[in-house]
């Protein structure tokens, strides 16, 4: 999937566009207040390259641990997770990614839904 999406350059561009959308979206932007977005984008790029089958080993925090404070303190929920998946799909569509690959990206996101939401 990583190669089909266009490799590292495509993931870099997608993450940058994606976070522009996230920060402009009232449903989820509050979760990123005070966050170092350069660091956040770098972590997201590493995760997506790994998740999409690229040549990197994810070295970030466990998804459950990384998001626990957002669930407990800010009420991170399925609604917010759905908004993130929606914004990722919009981003990929804008970049000309085929619908079958967008569906695969959404399926990858679904794998981490429960840990991210601490279910």
Image: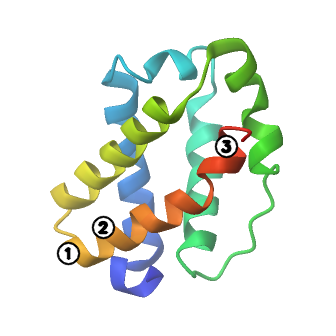
**Residue 27, can we see it?**
yes
Q: Earlier in the sequence, mark 1 or mark 3?
A: 1
Residue 107 disc label: none
Query: Where does residue 115 sit, x and y in percent of width and height?
Result: 72, 48
Whole-Å distance between the Cαs marked 1 and 3?
A: 27 Å
Q: Is the Cβ of the residue at disc 1 closer than 8 Å to that at disc 3? A: no
Residue 98 disc label: 1
Q: Earlier in the sequence, mark 3 or mark 2?
A: 2
Instruction: Check disc 2: other Cα within 10 Å, few if <14, some if 14-19, many if 20+.
Output: some
Q: Does residue 23 appear to the left or right of 118 in the view shown?
A: left
Q: Which residue is mark 3?
A: 116
Whole-Å distance between the Cαs marked 3 and 2?
A: 20 Å
Instruction: Check disc 1: other Cα within 10 Å, few if <14, some if 14-19, many if 20+.
Output: few
Tell me if residue 14 comes above or below residue 71 in the rendering: below
Is label 1 or label 3 in front? 3
Q: Is the Cβ of the residue at disc 3 closer than 8 Å to that at disc 2? A: no
Query: Where does residue 15 sit, x and y in percent of width and height?
Result: 43, 51
Query: Where does residue 41 sit, x and y in percent of width and height?
Result: 55, 44
Q: Which residue is mark 2?
A: 102
Q: Residue at x 63, y 72 (%)?
A: 50
Q: Residue at x 38, y 21 (%)?
A: 27
User: Element under label 2?
Assistant: helix
Q: Is the Cβ of the residue at disc 2 closer than 8 Å to that at disc 1? A: yes
Depth check: give the residue in front, 96 or 38. 96
Q: Residue at x 36, y 56 (%)?
A: 14
User: Element under label 1?
Assistant: loop
Query: Where does residue 20 sit, x and y in percent of width and height?
Result: 35, 34
């Amino acid at each position: 999937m990583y190669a089909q999406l266009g490799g590292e350059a495509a993931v870099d561009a997608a993450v940058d566009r994606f976070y522009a959308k996230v920060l402009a979206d009232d449903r989820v932007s509050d979760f990123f207040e005070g966050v170092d977005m350069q660091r956040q984008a770098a972590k997201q790029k590493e995760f997506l390259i790994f998740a999409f089958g690229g040549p990197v080993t994810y070295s970030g925090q466990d998804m459950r641990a990384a998001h626990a404070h957002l669930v407990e303190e800010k009420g991170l929920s399925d609604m917010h997770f759905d908004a993130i998946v929606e914004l990722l799909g919009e981003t990929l569509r804008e970049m000309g990614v085929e619908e079958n690959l967008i569906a695969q990206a959404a399926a990858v996101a679904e794998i981490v839904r429960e840990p991210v939401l601490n279910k």
